[in-house]
Amino acid sequence: MITKEHIFELLETVLDPEVPVLSVVDLGIIRHVEIQDELVKIQITPTYTGCPAMKMIEMNLQAAFAVENIPLSIETILSPAWTTDWMSENGKLKLQKYGIAAPIGLAGRSLGLFEKEIQIACPRCQSVHTEKISEFGSTACKALYRCLDCKEPFDYFKCH
């Protein structure tokens, strides 16, 4: 008998190829899990449409379930669009330990007229004395920052 608990244990073993400390559960891309007889149906939402990592994630999901001889069906759902609000708190902590500043604030929220941009803390020394170098970092979902205290560059996982 396949249980949802076992399914989520398997899902925790499937890592994001771009940020290999995050599972697909941490990332929040698993939208729905259903067990029909012996078939597991999973709905996933990409972090953004056209994300190159999604094909690899789908292959890794298929492989993880094949090892357990569990038939798997994967459906990609584009609406509603994925948001960093769906990331787990544990996933955000893992990002920080990995050297990537975790998303801050709520996705889709615009700054008010007199609000200052959120200060992004350096994941290495925790200083908020940082500056944005580029809107795009190692991948399109990250921005490149530099800490002005420890002088180290780092990625910030942007709010979506």
Image: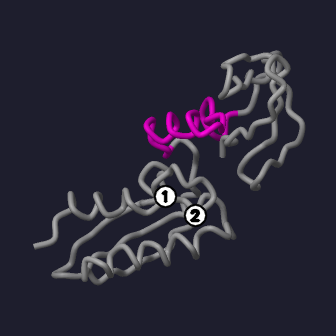
Q: Does residue 108 appear to the left or right of 70 in the view shown?
A: right
* Location of mark 2 (residue): 46
Q: Does residue 131 appear to the left or right of 99 in the view shown?
A: right
Q: The residue under label 1 is which amino acid type?
A: Ile
Q: Residues within 10 Å of mark 1 (few under 14, many from 20)?
A: many
* Location of mark 1 (residue): 29
How far across and how far down the image is residue 128, in percent? 74, 17
Quadrant of residue 154 in the image?
A: top right
Q: Is 118 situated above or below 44? A: above
How far across and how far down the image is residue 101, in percent? 66, 34
* The stretch drawn in magenta includes residue 148: no
Colour pattern: one colour
Disc 1 is placed on an element classified as: loop
Region of the chain picked out in magenta, as a range: 86-109
Q: Are marks 2 and 1 in contact (CB under 8 Å)?
A: yes
Q: Is 157 situated above or below 27? A: above
Q: Any mark on residue 115, and which?
A: none
Disc 2 is placed on an element classified as: loop
Q: The residue under label 2 is which amino acid type?
A: Pro
Q: Residue at x 82, y 15 (%)?
A: 114
Q: Nearer the viewer, residue 103 or 17?
A: 17
**Quarter of the figure with the N terminus:** bottom left
Marked residue nearer the N-terminal end (2 or 1): 1
* The stretch drawn in magenta includes residue 94: yes
Q: Nearer the viewer, residue 100 or 158?
A: 100
